[in-house]
Structure formats: structure tokens, C-alpha cells
Image: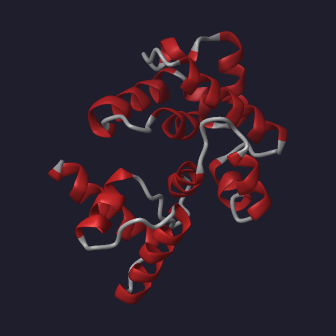
Amino acid sequence: MGTVICDVSFQARRKYESTIRPRLLQLQSAWPDAVTVGGFQARLATEDLGVAMRFNSPGRVATAHALTDLLAARGVDTRDDLHYWLGDADNRAALRQVKGVGPKSVDYIGNLVGRSQVAVDVHLRAFAAEAGVTGLPYEKLRAVYVETAACLGHEPGGLEHAVWRFKAQAG
């Protein structure tokens, strides 16, 4: 869970494969007890997350702490807990109250714990723009991707990941 929380907290506007992924793997190795929210929270109480992630970003560290505190307060401890918990719209809204967590982050968290969702980011927006779909707010563009996936017989998260990979490698 520590890597899920850090992934969503640190990945925005960063090169994932070269910057974020290696740091998440290192954190997972260094903090094996952070597999649960409780274990991660215990580490955060005694160690500096910015140092552990080799990331000088107080705002992103604060987001990780706030997400951890919210999940712990709501009884979410494991990936399975979070997967189930995200099925409730009120819980998704609670995540949005954390500074640094927007609709894309909520959908991204879902993907990280096995929910098939579309997290619209700059890559998905650029792909849509190249197809002539421009100016849509987040929720409407997400709906376009979800409907497109359904028409193609794919999971929404699978289509999202394919588009993201294509655009990330092209850019």
C-alpha cells in the first residue's frame, strides 16, 4: 500500500519509467512492512518519506501523508480493502478532499488496485485531440474512453493503458 500511495502522490508530471518506478521499487524493498496502510503509517511516523523516495517535494510528501491518514481513519489497510472501498462514490469524494488529489488521481488509484478505470492525463488528452476530440471536461472525456473501450470489447483500464503507453513512447 505504501507504493500505491506514493505512486499516486509522486507520479504527476514526472517520467514514470525513469523517475518514479525505480524509486517505488526501491521503497518497496527498503520498507517491506509498508505493504499495508498501517505498516506504511508506522514508517511515516519514524522516517522521512522525501528522503526514502529521493524526492524533494514537500507538497507530494504531504499528499502521501494525507492519503495515508485518510485511508487509515476509514479502515482501509490492504489493496483488497481499497479496491472494495473505491466502489462507493462517497469514498471517492473523500479522496478528492485531499490536497493534490483530483479526479485523475482517484481513477489512477483504482487502476493501481485492480479496478479497470480510465485516468485521463496529458497523454490521453493528446491522443483524443489528435482524433479531433477536444475541449471536453475530465468526466466527459473519461466517458468517451469508457464507451470506446466497450465498443471495442476491451476493459476501460486496458484501453487507457494502451493509449498511455503509445503516447508516452511517442513523446
* Residue 37: % across, % down: 69, 36
Q: Quadrant of residue 45?
A: top right
Residue drawn at 55 percent across, 64 percent down: 115
Q: How is the image coloured?
A: secondary structure
Q: What is the quadrant of the N terminus in the image? A: top right
Which residue in the rendered view is the most extreme toward the front? 135
* Residue 111: % across, % down: 51, 57
* Residue 70: % across, % down: 77, 38
Q: How many marks?
A: 0
**Which of 133 and 119 lies nearest the eye of the viewer?**
133
Residue 6 relative to residue 169: left or right? right
Residue 13 relative to residue 33: left or right? left
Residue drawn at 79 percent across, 59 percent down: 90
* Residue 51: % across, % down: 49, 11
Residue drawn at 59 percent across, 12 percent down: 48
Q: Is residue 32 above or below residue 119?
A: above
Q: Quadrant of residue 35?
A: top right
Residue drawn at 43 percent across, 31 percent down: 24
**Which of 158 and 63 lies nearest the eye of the viewer?**
63
Which residue in the rendered view is the most extreme toward the left? 170
Q: Is residue 91 above or below residue 160?
A: above
Residue 158 relative to residue 113: left or right? left
Q: Is residue 68 above or below residue 114?
A: above
